[in-house]
Image (cartoon, coloured by chain):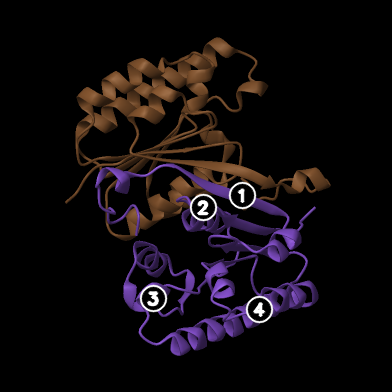
Chain colours: A purple, B brown
Amino acid sequence: MRHGLVIINTGNGKGKSTAAFGTLLRAWGRGLRVCVVQFIKAETGNWGEIQAARKLNIEWHSLGDGFTWLSKDLAKSAEKARHAWTLAQEKIASGAYDLIVLDEMTYTFHEKWIDVNDVVAWLKEHKPPELHLIITGRDAPDALIGFADLVTEMREIKHPLARGIKAQPGIEF
Amino acid sequence: MRHGLVIINTGNGKGKSTAAFGTLLRAWGRGLRVCVVQFIKAETGNWGEIQAARKLNIEWHSLGDGFTWLSKDLAKSAEKARHAWTLAQEKIASGAYDLIVLDEMTYTFHEKWIDVNDVVAWLKEHKPPELHLIITGRDAPDALIGFADLVTEMREIKHPLARGIKAQPGIEF
């Protein structure tokens, strides 16, 4: 029996977004209709996953303004995040997908660009029952965790940066 | 500066293998040379990720005998796991890859099919310094965690099975 899951990948460790992309790959492998909306990363970043999506012809919207701590215009960053949510709402309500990933969305709640209670209320009304949804990002708010079916915390046990090893292309970005 | 990372995804939660596959997708997107060896899953399982790998022409070896708790012949399962490690050793030592995933390998340590100390000793001698390696599975042994650069614990916070929702194709397999 198909039951659209609301899945949250949160925590301070690695693997929140990559687990979403791995699930996307698995779903895509089975011929499911998939789509990604990224709330922080910008298209211009040309990240490994964006390059992969282009090669695979997977629908992938990187609508963010880059990392919030590097933003020079937070009003513009907020506007971009709200635009990403508007597009995500269209995609979710359309019924045209089996799996949608909302990558790094939780940061928009922390920045108060989007209200998590509004998002949960909207999803309760508009998410098709069969649609799987994955939301990633640190510190998922309780309202979102309460609404979700499957929540995993990625906990950092050991990180190479502590030993002075820099982020590796193709692995960490 | 390229530094081949040894990455462990462990814990009782979802996302250990999918985070490895998402990283693989990211690396593949950047044109890195990637390969997967699965120690438990069998080729005949026709899992979503195996179907995706076929479509992408990614080198993917599913050499396991299926889930250990379903095995009718544990000696054969052990033999298959050891064969998978032999193949993994060839791939690792070859220098022909940038990223190799050893999926669900930790179970072979718990079953005592492969000795984790032998694996760590062999890797110390034979893993090319630039090769990234991801090993997944529950209860990663301390010897492996001590050797690794990056360790993440995937912790289950909430699981749909607790509410009677069965595993969903394309999402959980």
- Neighbour class for label 3 at 10 Å: few (<14), some, many (≥20)? some
Which comes sooner in the sequence, label 2 or label 3?
Answer: 2
The answer to whether any part of residue B114 appears in the image is: yes
Q: Amino acid at mark 3?
A: Gly
Which comes sooner in the sequence, label 3 or label 4?
Answer: 3
Q: Which mark is residue A19?
A: 2
SS state under label 4: loop
Q: Amino acid at mark 2?
A: Ala
Mark pair 3, 4: CA separation: 20 Å
Residue B148 sits in which quadrant?
top left
Which comes sooner in the sequence, label 1 or label 4?
Answer: 4
Q: Residue furthest left?
A: B1
The residue identified by callout 1 is A152
Q: Residue at x 54, y 76 (%)?
A: A111
Could you say where residue A34 lies in the image, as x and y percent from the top left? Answer: 57, 66
Mark pair 2, 3: CA separation: 21 Å
The one of B64 and A163 positioned closer to us in this rendering:
A163
Which comes sooner in the sequence, label 1 or label 2?
Answer: 2
The residue identified by callout 4 is A115
Could you say where residue A128 lies in the image, as x and y percent from the top left? Answer: 75, 71
Q: Chain of mark 2?
A: A
Q: Chain of mark 4?
A: A
Q: Residue furthest right?
A: B164
Which comes sooner in the sequence, label 3 or label 1?
Answer: 3
Q: Amino acid at mark 4?
A: Asp
Above or below A154: residue A173:
below
Mark pair 2, 4: CA separation: 25 Å
